[in-house]
């Protein structure tokens, strides 16, 4: 009985000791500047925009691929200016009926969902919708 243990030990030890290599990119999490989602309506929107602090964005829609792009310097400055006036506030209860768009914004640790856009949200949403229109294109 001991002979099989002695014979298999040299084969099993490297397999048990081997540690899978973790890619550096997967280990580093990017810091999020703003997270925006637009959902609902009869068209069935599900648009999602994540802007990272380095000025790059991840764009996705209900259908199609996820796209990673970087904003131009001017676009990033405009967005940061709009974000400086943003007041996230509290979430709004869902209205009765159908065909409403739900807007969700997360910034600096605050997250809220609204069905009507407050004044401080409008320039931010405008900038993020423009980025979605400009950079997301199905291939």
Image (spheres, rainbow, N blue to C red):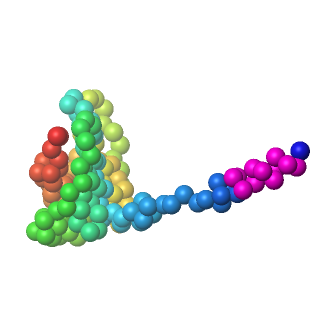
Residue 137 visible in the current orientation: yes
User: Residue 121 lies in magenta, yes or no?
Assistant: no
Q: Nearer the viewer, residue 133 or 25?
A: 25
Q: Nearer the viewer, residue 74 or 122?
A: 74
Relative to 51, say whether 47 is above or below: above
Q: Quadrant of residue 82?
A: bottom left
Q: Quadrant of residue 54?
A: bottom left
Residue under the point 25% across and 42% down: 65
Q: Main secondary structure of the magenta part?
A: helix
Residue under the point 24% across and 58% down: 57
Residue that lies at the very extreme toward the right in this rendered image: 1
Magenta range is 2-12
Residue 122 visible in the current orientation: no
Residue under the point 30% across and 50% down: 104
Q: Quadrant of the C terminus?
A: top left
- Count the marks: how many? 0
């Amino acid at each position: 009985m001991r002979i099989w243990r002695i014979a298999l030990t040299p084969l099993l030890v490297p397999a048990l000791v081997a540690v899978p290599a973790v890619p550096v990119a997967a280990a580093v999490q990017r810091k999020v500047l703003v997270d925006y989602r637009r959902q609902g309506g009869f068209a069935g929107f599900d648009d999602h925009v994540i802007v990272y602090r380095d000025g790059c964005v991840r764009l996705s829609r209900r259908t199609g691929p996820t796209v990673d792009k970087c904003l131009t310097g001017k676009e990033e400055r405009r967005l940061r200016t709009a974000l400086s006036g943003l007041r996230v506030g509290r979430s709004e209860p869902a209205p009765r009926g159908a065909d409403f768009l739900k807007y969700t914004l997360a910034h600096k640790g605050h997250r809220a969902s609204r069905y009507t856009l407050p004044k401080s949200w409008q320039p931010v949403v405008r900038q993020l919708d423009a980025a979605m229109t400009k950079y997301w294109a199905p291939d």
